[in-house]
Image (cartoon, rainbow, N blue to C red):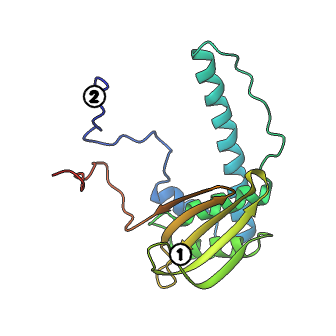
Amino acid sequence: PGGAGVPPGVLNARAGSSPTRAQLDALPTDPSALRATLLAQAKQQDAQAQQYMEQQAKKAGKAAAFPVATDPLSDNDLVFEQATDLLWEPHLSPQLRSALYKVLADTPGVTVQTGAKDSSGRPATEISRYQAPGKTTVETFEDPATGATLESAWNSPGEFDEDLYLSTTYTNTIPADPYQG
């Protein structure tokens, strides 16, 4: 409140920003149908993001025209990103998780390395794909025993970003800051 830099006590995520269990359960488990759904979702999200950016530019009094990417992500890039993002969800049914792995296995350019380790040294299965736009290798590290996502990483020339997950759960309250007092 008042720009004090203090996070709110309750998180109020924008509706639709994270799928509900019902939405996850409604996703198809046939790999072909799931791939089509993931691609449609990615394209819809891209269109919504573009519309949002144009609205924000208009509010700021700037030209609302954003150039179209000259090297956009391919359909395979979009499916890979959607599938690996969905693997992060802790409430996936075993059938949906299996279907996601099948979609990834059938996506050109995907590599799987068993016996890998995440950046904290935990045993992992690494699933990765190179994306020509941005010259980025996108990686996800999955727990071979549970299928839980351990880490997501983006490796591009001169830059490496990662998200390391120690645990994943849902809540609408912010936990205490472990770095204070």
* Mark linked to residue 35: none
Image point (27%, 28%), residue name = 4
Query: How far apart are the alpha carbons under marks 1 and 2?
Result: 38 Å
Percent across and percent down for residue 99 are: 64, 73
Check the image and report above or below for 32 versus 122: above
Q: Position of residue 20 (x, y in %)?
A: 46, 54
Q: Which residue is mark 1?
A: 142
Q: Quadrant of residue 65?
A: top right
**What amino acid is labelled 2 in the image?**
Ala
Image side of residue 24 versus residue 139, left or right: left
Identify the residue position indicated by label 2 in the image. Answer: 4
| Mark 2 residue crowding within 10 angstroms, few (<14) / some (14–19) / many (20+) | few
> Please, what is the three-letter code of the amino acid marked with disc 1?
Glu
Q: Secondary structure at mark 1?
A: strand
Q: Residue at x 65, y 43 (%)?
A: 45
Give the percent coordinates (x, y) of residue 79: 71, 59
Q: Position of residue 95 (x, y in %)?
A: 57, 76
- Which comes before the other along the chain, label 1 or label 2? 2
- Please tell me whether mark 2 sits on a helix, a strand or a loop: loop
Q: Is residue 79 found left or right of 25 in the rendered image?
A: right
28 vs 125: above or below: above
